[in-house]
Amino acid sequence: MTKARITVLATGGTIAGIAGSALRHDYRPGQIDIVEYLSRVEGLGLEAEFAGHQIANIGSEDVGPKVWAPLHEAILTALADPECDGVIVTHGTDTLEETAFLLDLTLPCTKPVVLVGAMRPADAVGYDGLRNFANAVRVASDAEAAGRGVLVVMGDRVFAARDVRKVRTRSTDAFRGYPRGSIGLVTPSALDWFGAPWRTDEVARFAYRDNLPLVVILYVHANMDPDLARRIVGTDQRGVVIAGVGEGNLPDSVREVLIERRKAGVAIVRASRVDEGLVDREPEDDPNGFVAARALNPQKARILLQLLLADGVSEPAVMQRAFDER
Ligand code: SIN
């Protein structure tokens, strides 16, 4: 059997974290470099050859354009390399869903691209980072993975970037997909897809850009002060994503603030602070010029809105179609 040739791009996170003791809860992410990590992987005897590159070695709370730009470029290089069959990105789990979705929207679907992390540091008892990595290798070695866009492998499950979300702060079973649950089950020796590939994009849906427009997330709560909302939204934002209550709802007084901003040309997207569920259009959205986030949570709605604004899209109906897409 020929070995898959996998490019591994490391960015840090708990998968590369160290606690200094097998039993300690607190630890520092991004401590092991890619050379050391791949030497630990070697012991697993996986049917793959690895080319490792260190993009960053940080906690994912600090991931942003300074990491995304070189990461995106390194993935494009790997996709163009005939010696590479698939790409794995090791990443902290806290913002993994945002990086995965950004890459999903800005990369072509020509080879598998898989993000993977861990919930326990590398020296913890029950470290999940090697199993998750071995699973990611199985997925990245499967040519059929490419037709599913950028993927996330955690806890023996495969998730599509558009669906995946972190739902637990500690458990190794920390990720879920919405509205599709997981799209596959994986172990180091077996991979089962649920359904056929659905993407054939030879070109990316959006251009990758370093300077994405400013978009703020407004987290709505009971008894919200409209003046506070006005201060949070400010005047320099190009867009606002509402993390609304229930199905993207907000107090009338706060809605008035956002209608004002919309009249000034700011894009407004209604999402929900609730973990699961669609946010559909409501009758007031048409006259207000608001967009409904549908299945995207606020942090993903923000990324899609930034890319739309960067592409010069300003018409709410055109934005709505992008949020409706699968
Ligand atoms: C991080 O996101 O970098 C820390 C948490 C983790 O990787 O699980």
Image (spheres, helix red, strand yellow):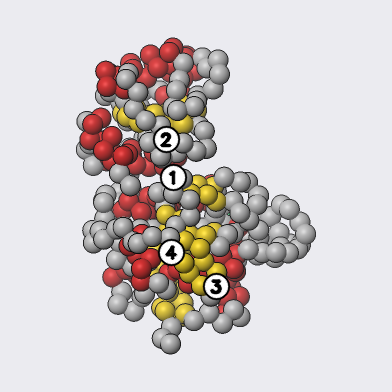
- First of labels 3, 2 by sequence position: 3
Q: Which mark is residue 278?
A: 2
Identify the residue at image location x=61%, y=80%.
Answer: 43
- Label 3 sits on residue: 188
- First of labels 4, 3 by sequence position: 3
* Labels 4 & 1 near each other (Cβ < 8 A): no
Structural distance between the alpha carbons of marks 2 and 4: 25 Å
Q: Which amino acid does label 2 sit on?
A: Leu
Residue farthest to the bottom?
A: 1
**Residue 144 quadrant:** bottom left
Question: In this view of the protein, can residue 90 be seen by the observer?
Answer: no
- Label 4 sits on residue: 193
Identify the residue at image location x=39%, y=29%.
Answer: 270
* Labels 1 & 3 near each other (Cβ < 8 A): no
Of labels 1 and 3, the one closer to you: 1
Number of other residues with Cα within 10 Å of mark 3, as a class: few under 14, some 14 to 19, many 20 or more: some
Q: Which mark is residue 309?
A: none
- Label 1 sits on residue: 179
Q: Which amino acid does label 1 sit on?
A: Pro
- Label 2 secondary element: loop
Structural distance between the alpha carbons of marks 2 and 1: 8 Å
Number of other residues with Cα within 10 Å of mark 2, as a class: few under 14, some 14 to 19, many 20 or more: many
- First of labels 2, 1 by sequence position: 1
- Label 1 secondary element: loop
For residue 239, side relative to residue 51 (left or right): left
Q: Which amino acid does label 4 sit on?
A: Trp
